[in-house]
């Protein structure tokens, strides 16, 4: 995406510096899927400014909303109702957040209220936080109350000196004792209780906390990121090979922003994989950041939202939704692993968090850092064109070398025959695992397929087990004795009889998943201590932290996993990576298939040899001549990206052209097809603009909804949003049919 400079909303241009006058007509945006703000009047005695959270009447109910600016004045004055109240304890929504809502809504063709709902994502946070109980020293001496002073009690009193009151648990942690000691001191009169905001008691990251010694390359890169903090909006691509220390480099920019008193946002693609990152952050800055994602408890989300809005949260690390928090004074945005597809939001308001992070930086005059070892083609092209600055780290930190990549042609050296059935490992990889185990080093086997087998069919009649809600095969999970759909979550016990012909014990697993690979490893290497790692088995940050501990402490010899192992984990003793099906993902007609496969293979290969010992990577493939495999073998990423760019340029595909998808869906197949064909008949007719479809989507049924797709292809300079808005306004469809617009689509299923 190439972003134009966001302009202030139509309301922001005329915002008065003083409160609105009584009787003034104001616009209030509600966090509902509505086309825009509604007009209300300011009642006498109510002090209202833009950004205030208010209570307004809507029909027969009352709703919370945000004062957006001056009213449009399109309603009969007699019909305009008055604002009921301002929520006194709700932090106001900053101007930058309001402008961001307007921009995102216009770009994604979403209802502004639906975008605002992502900002006001924690309704309870609009009410004041219940005060917490904290303790501070009274100044009374132990002798005065006849209390014997123990070492633990002395540590508690010393911890109270020179810092604000702390809750019992936090005070006990600082003093390395129990909460019972704290309460005993309070009962004796040596401590007293005070009421505080719970966030005031939490430790914040310290920008002056000493960091590690950087290499010359790292120090130069860090200096450029720090210098960008004083220049307003900018975008810098921080590119470096896996293991080059990109995190420590952007930590220096974080430290500088902290010293300036600004807030920092770090976006990560997979919050469950941040255990090591969080540990490194706490060591570097003396305290953990606030974390934002869907698994955070409601109480913690409430406190975090208010802390962000009130400026008490110094650093937030989170998934894509963290971008919409109402930052009080945002000073730096970092998008780690910016190439990851997980930054794309596919439901509700459809957006790409990396692209919207750039927009948020423009709106708030905030510098943005995009970090990756394998930048997306869009980001690389923006850097090449000079729209983004580029900082490059060419070598691994502390003298570690890049792994040796070897391609195994499975057509020439297929797996050996084995007693237990079929093998999925080439002889060269089996020998490499054997040698690695003998050397006391660790291995990783990578296969990007969850479960035991991707397909189950009947040997008697050929029936394939399919999801009843989706056009997708059910994946066997033998560990659970179940078949599961990875699109809608449908799950059913693994049957003994074929549901089509009734034959018993004729259902066969076809193809390998990681469970099947783990089964082979257990039989080939029974003495090896192995672990299966997939999103099904790694339930959250705690499980990730325990996995990291076991690998670091050498309690595991071999990891078998999916792409969840490819992202940012650091295992110093891991020297061998084997990719079981390097061709997976190269087919299917996806625009970004080759780019995505290259990024994934590069990331997983980068897990090898990050410590003192060199690493080796084996790629099993039936297409060794493919440009992706050739680039991996030669280590020439630039050559691959140049070829990929040229192919996209010739076809006018992103980043050299624009795409927008329309996904038509509904429970009734005929109604969906009719609506899709009506859209096809009224498709825009503009020079250089082409509309492909309508056609049934590759996933023709998803979660019980039938799906058709249309794809608009346009030149890069085209403004596709007005085009699509006029297109949709010309067609009417039943209420049961939904048309979702995806500007800059990343998935084509």
Image (cartoon, rainbow, N blue to C red):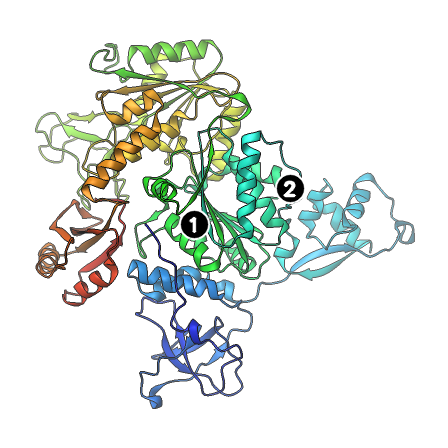
The answer to which quarter of the image holds residue 339 is top left
Tag 1 secondary structure:
loop
Viewer-proximal residue among 383 and 280: 383
What is the spatial separation of the Cα atoms under label 2 and label 1, in whole angstroms? 25 Å
Q: Which residue is mark 2?
A: 286
Q: Is residue 186 left or right of residue 539?
A: right
Q: Residue at x 34, y 30 (%)?
A: 638
Q: Residue at x 15, y 29 (%)?
A: 457
Tag 2 secondary structure:
loop
- Residue 485 in percent (x, y) is at 25, 40
Nearest to N terminus: mark 2 or mark 1: 2
Does residue 365 appear in this view?
yes
Q: Which residue is mark 1?
A: 294
Number of the front mark, 2 or 1: 2
Q: Residue at x 66, y 38 (%)?
A: 210
Viewer-proximal residue among 630 and 572: 630
Viewer-proximal residue among 420 and 320: 320
Q: Which residue is at the far bottom?
A: 78
Does residue 449 appear in this view?
no
The reply to whether discs 2 and 1 touch (Cβ–Cβ < 8 Å) is no
Above or below 369: residue 247: above
């Amino acid at each position: 995406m190439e972003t134009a400079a966001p302009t202030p909303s139509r309301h922001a241009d005329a915002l008065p510096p003083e409160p609105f006058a009584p009787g003034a007509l104001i616009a209030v945006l509600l966090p509902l899927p509505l086309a825009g703000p509604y007009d209300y009047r300011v009642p006498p005695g109510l002090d209202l400014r833009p950004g205030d959270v208010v209570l307004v009447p809507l029909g027969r109910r009352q709703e919370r909303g945000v004062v957006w600016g001056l009213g449009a004045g399109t309603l009969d004055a007699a019909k305009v109702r008055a604002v009921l109240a301002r929520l006194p304890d709700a932090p106001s929504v900053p101007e930058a957040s309001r402008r961001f809502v307007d921009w995102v809504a216009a770009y994604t063709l979403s209802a502004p209220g639906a975008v605002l709902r992502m900002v006001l994502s924690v309704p309870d946070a609009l009410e004041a936080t219940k005060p917490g109980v904290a303790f501070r020293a009274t100044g009374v001496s132990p002798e005065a109350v006849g209390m014997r002073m123990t070492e633990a009690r002395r540590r508690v009193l010393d911890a109270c000196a020179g810092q604000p009151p702390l809750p019992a648990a936090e005070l006990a942690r600082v003093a390395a004792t129990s909460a019972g000691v704290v309460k005993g001191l309070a009962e004796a009169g040596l401590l007293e209780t005070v009421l505080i905001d719970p966030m005031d008691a939490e430790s914040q990251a310290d920008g002056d906390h000493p960091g590690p010694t950087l290499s010359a390359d790292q120090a130069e890169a860090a200096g450029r990121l720090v210098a960008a903090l004083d220049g307003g909006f900018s975008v810098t691509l921080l590119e470096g090979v896996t293991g080059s220390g990109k995190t420590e480099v952007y930590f220096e920019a974080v430290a500088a922003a902290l010293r300036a008193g600004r807030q920092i946002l770090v976006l990560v693609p997979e919050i469950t994989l941040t255990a090591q990152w969080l540990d490194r952050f706490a060591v570097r800055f003396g305290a953990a950041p606030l974390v934002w994602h869907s698994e955070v408890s409601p109480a913690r989300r409430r406190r975090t939202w208010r802390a962000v809005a009130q400026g008490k949260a110094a650093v937030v690390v989170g998934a894509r939704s963290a971008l919409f928090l109402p930052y009080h004074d945002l000073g730096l945005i970092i998008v780690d692993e910016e190439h990851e597809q997980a930054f794309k939001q596919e439901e509700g308001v459809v957006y790409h968090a990396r692209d919207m992070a750039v927009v948020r930086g423009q709106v708030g005059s905030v510098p943005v850092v995009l970090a990756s070892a394998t930048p997306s083609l869009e980001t690389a092209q923006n850097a090449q064109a000079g729209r983004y600055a580029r900082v490059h780290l060419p070598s691994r930190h502390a003298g570690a070398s890049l792994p040796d990549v070897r391609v195994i042609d499975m057509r020439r050296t297929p797996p050996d025959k084995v007693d237990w059935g079929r093998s999925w490992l080439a002889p060269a990889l089996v020998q490499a695992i054997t040698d690695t185990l003998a050397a006391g080093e660790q291995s990783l086997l990578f296969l990007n397929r969850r479960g035991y087998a991707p397909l189950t069919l009947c040997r008697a009649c050929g029936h394939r087990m399919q999801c009843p809600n989706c056009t997708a095969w059910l994946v066997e999970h033998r560990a659970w004795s179940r078949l599961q759909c990875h699109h809608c979550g449908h799950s059913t016990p693994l049957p003994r009889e074929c549901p089509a012909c009734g034959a018993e014990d004729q259902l066969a697993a076809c193809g390998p998943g990681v469970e099947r690979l783990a089964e082979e490893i257990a039989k080939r290497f029974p003495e090896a201590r192995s672990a299966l790692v997939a999103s099904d088995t790694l339930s959250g940050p705690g499980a990730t932290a325990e996995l990291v501990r076991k690998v670091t402490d050498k309690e595991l010899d071999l990891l078998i996993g999916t792409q969840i192992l490819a992202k940012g984990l650091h295992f110093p003793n891991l020297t061998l990576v084997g990719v079981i099906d390097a061709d997976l993902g190269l087919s299917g007609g996806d625009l970004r298939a080759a780019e995505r496969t290259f990024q994934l293979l590069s990331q997983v290969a980068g897990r090898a040899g990050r410590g003192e010992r060199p690493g080796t990577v084996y790629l099993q493939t039936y297409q060794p001549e493919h440009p992706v495999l050739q680039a991996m073998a030669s280590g020439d990423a630039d050559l691959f990206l140049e070829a990929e760019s040229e192919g996209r340029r010739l076809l006018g595909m992103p980043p050299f052209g624009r795409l927008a998808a329309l996904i038509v869906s509904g429970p009734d197949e005929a109604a969906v097809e009719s609506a899709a064909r009506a859209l096809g008949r009224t498709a825009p007719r503009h020079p250089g603009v082409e509309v492909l479809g309508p056609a049934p989507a590759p996933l023709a049924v998803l979660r019980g909804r039938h799906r058709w797709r249309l794809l608009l292809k346009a030149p890069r300079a085209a403004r596709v949003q007005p085009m699509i808005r006029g297109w949709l306004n010309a067609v009417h469809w039943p209420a049961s049919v939904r048309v979702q617009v995806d500007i800059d689509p990343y998935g084509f299923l």
